[in-house]
Amino acid sequence: MKVEVVESAPSFEIVYPIVVIGGGACGLSAALAASDMGLEVLIVEQDKSLMGTTAMSTGLIPAAGTPEQKIAGIKDSAEIFAADIQSKAQNGADSAIVNKIAQESAETISWLQKTHKVPLSLVTGFLYPGHSVQRMYGSPSRSGSELMACLEAAALVNQVDILTEALVEDLIVDQSNKLVGLRVIRPDGRTTEIGCKTLILACCGFAGNEEMVAQYTPEMKDATFHGHPGNKGHAIKWGEALGAKLADMDAYQGHGGLAYGHGIPILWPLIMEGGFQVNRSGVRFSNEAKGYSEQAVNVLAQEGNVAWSIFDQRLYNLMTDFEDFKDAVEAGALVTADDAALLSEKIRVSSDGLVNTIKQVAELANGQGNDEFGRDFSHKPCLTPPYYAAKVTGALFHTQGGLEVDTSARVLAKNGQALPNLFAGGGAARGISGAGAAGYMAGNGLVTATTLGKIAGRCAAQQVLAGN
């Protein structure tokens, strides 16, 4: 993967006004936004089908100040959303980008719903860590694969051209650092050169690149990688070659609830509504409600790099709205028993430890005492038999650091100036989680993918239409 500098633009057989590298939620959002403005767009995707990191997620997108929130009596605004983001990120995120994404989030949902018929609805019933109000939107099955299918269908309606099984090997720039084209390799080894007026990088982060993970996020170098294998850091490498600025390269989304041996996330509403985690000694080891991202390291620190998520029938029923949970049930990832002692025997953790932990959590839920880890259980019902357990490990889902962009999604050089015609979003761009894992708030990945993608597509189209 390299950047080739040419003295003058080659005579390309095919030239598109806008080329998007990557066919995930960011790439599809960018393509939809640009094609809405009447321009031809090409998506170049290395896989046989459009999946990306989005297809492995729950597909939930946060948005603030929406009509559905108002109908539900939920008071929210871009300012409240931005404050939540920065609070979780300990004020480490780029304030201009955070504010822009928060301000645009409601319009992104409306645009997807009304213009492109993506069936997104407000998710109610629970809060994710860091969110002060209910603002998540998802498709009917609450799955990223369903969201991807809807976005791809919209792209086809908009007559977006999609080239699959096409690995971008090189970018081609002129001596002013302006992108003029790209070189693509097909499965049979054929090479195709495609010209472009503007280029949008939407090709994920680097969580699937072991060397880059060890370099930038060493605490997760031994974690299970549960993400799209295309996360190889191509956008970062091209950006560096072009003199782009990188930021928050140690930021990532971890997950403290990947079903051990099954590779299926046991999602965090289960924890937020009263579930908890124990280690082999049957005892809790952290405040699980702080967030599933930072919990990954806590789980990995336990004996065997594993823990058990403990819950009951009420929480089981709550989770059946999620395809991932249904998959976990079908895969046999859950264990159940009529009492704590029998459950501990089945999952091979200390019986005294688990029995005492369930008792302690019940006391905390009844307002008796204070949790040593600072978690508040008092607003959730006590767990009641039968009990359930899922053996989990800590995992790396995707990275959050990347290319610095401005509020128009233009990639910035190290001197702060925008590169001539290069845009980025999603995993290719710096996220809104600040540094490390603790700043990741549920939906940070998809709100930046869809909203920055939308902004990139519109601004790239405006640049082409202006003749720049």
Image (tube, rainbow, N blue to C red):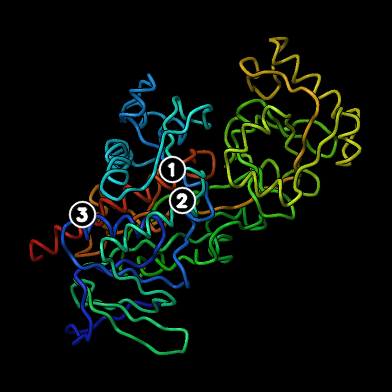
Out of 320 and 8, give the one closest to the viewer: 320
Where residue 316 sits: x, y (%)? Answer: 68, 34
Q: Are marks 2 and 1 in contact (CB under 8 Å)?
A: yes
Q: Is residue 269 left or right of residue 236?
A: right
Where residue 177 sits: x, y (%)? Answer: 22, 71
Q: Secondary structure at mark 3?
A: helix
Nearer to us of marks 1 and 3 is: 3
Give the class, few, some or many, for how many residues have Cα within 10 Å of label 1's Cα (few <14, many ≥20): many
Q: Residue visible at 22% across and 59% down?
A: 34
Name the residue type under label 3: Arg
Where residue 313 sits: x, y (%)? Answer: 72, 29
Residue at the disc numbered 1: 444
Residue at the disc numbered 3: 458
**Gap between marks 1 and 3 measured at Cα:** 21 Å
Q: Could you tell me which quadrant the N terminus lies in?
A: bottom left
- Which badge, 3 or 2, comes first in the chain's sequence? 2
Name the residue type under label 1: Asn
Q: Which mark is residue 400?
A: 2
* Above or below, 210 relative to 431: below
